[in-house]
C-alpha cells in the first residue's frame, strides 16, 4: 500500500466571512472528505502572509491506497454528490491542488 499526501491551497471568497468559512471547512468539509475510502486524516494550516497566487489556507490529507487514481475518482464523485446536496460552500476558492507520493517514512528527532 502506498502513502500519499494531497495538498490543497484555498482562499475564502469573502474575507469578511472567513470565520464562517473556517467553521464550515472544519466541521462539514473535513469530515465529508474523510468519508472517502483511503483518505486517512486531514489537517489545515493558515499562511499569515500569502503571496500573489498563493492560498491563505492549506489542507493536507494523508492517503493510503493501492490505487491512488481510484481514491481520486471516489473523491471527485463525492464532491459532485456534496455539491448536489448543498454541502459545498460558495466561500470556497481552490487555488491549487497537488498529489505527492511518500518516498520515505517519517523521520523524527532523536
Image (tube, rainbow, N blue to C red):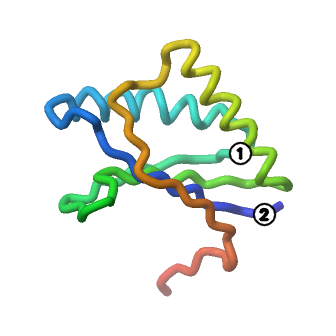
- Which marked residue is nearer to the observer: mark 2 or mark 1? 1
- Between 67 and 93, the one nearer to me in the picture: 93
x, y percent for residue 85: 56, 12
Q: Is residue 70 left or right of residue 40?
A: right
Mark number, residue 72 = 1
For mark 2, give the secondary structure. strand
Sequence order check, earlier mark of 2 and 1: 2
At horizontal 29% and vertical 38% (from top left) the residue drawn is 12
x, y percent for residue 72: 71, 45
- Label 2 CA crowd tier, 10 Å (few <14, some 14–19, many 20+): few
Residue extending farthest bottom: 110
In the rendered picture of this protein, how many numbered marks are placed on residues? 2
At horizontal 70% and vertical 30% (from top left) the residue drawn is 77
At horizontal 63% and vertical 66% (from top left) the residue drawn is 100
Residue 87 position (above or below residue 79): above
Res 22 quadrant in image: top left
Residue extending farthest front: 53
- Label 1 CA crowd tier, 10 Å (few <14, some 14–19, many 20+): some
Mark number, residue 42 = none
Res 36 quadrant in image: top right
At horizontal 33% and vertical 30% (from top left) the residue drawn is 91
Badge 2 is on which residue?
Answer: 2
* Separation (CA) of disc 2 from disc 1: 14 Å
User: Where, quadrant-wise, is the N terminus in this rendering?
Assistant: bottom right
x, y percent for residue 66: 85, 55
Amino acid at each position: 500500500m502506498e502513502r500519499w499526501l494531497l495538498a490543497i491551497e484555498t482562499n475564502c471568497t469573502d474575507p469578511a466571512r472567513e470565520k464562517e468559512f473556517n467553521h464550515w471547512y472544519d466541521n462539514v468539509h473535513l469530515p465529508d472528505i474523510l468519508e472517502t475510502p483511503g483518505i486517512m486524516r486531514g489537517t489545515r494550516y493558515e499562511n499569515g502572509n500569502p503571496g500573489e497566487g498563493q492560498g491563505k489556507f492549506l489542507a493536507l490529507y494523508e492517503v493510503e491506497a493501492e490505487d491512488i487514481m481510484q481514491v481520486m475518482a471516489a473523491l471527485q464523485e463525492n464532491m459532485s454528490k456534496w455539491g448536489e446536496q448543498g454541502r459545498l460552500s460558495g466561500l470556497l476558492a481552490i487555488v491549487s491542488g497537488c498529489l505527492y507520493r511518500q518516498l520515505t517514512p517519517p523521520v523524527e528527532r532523536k
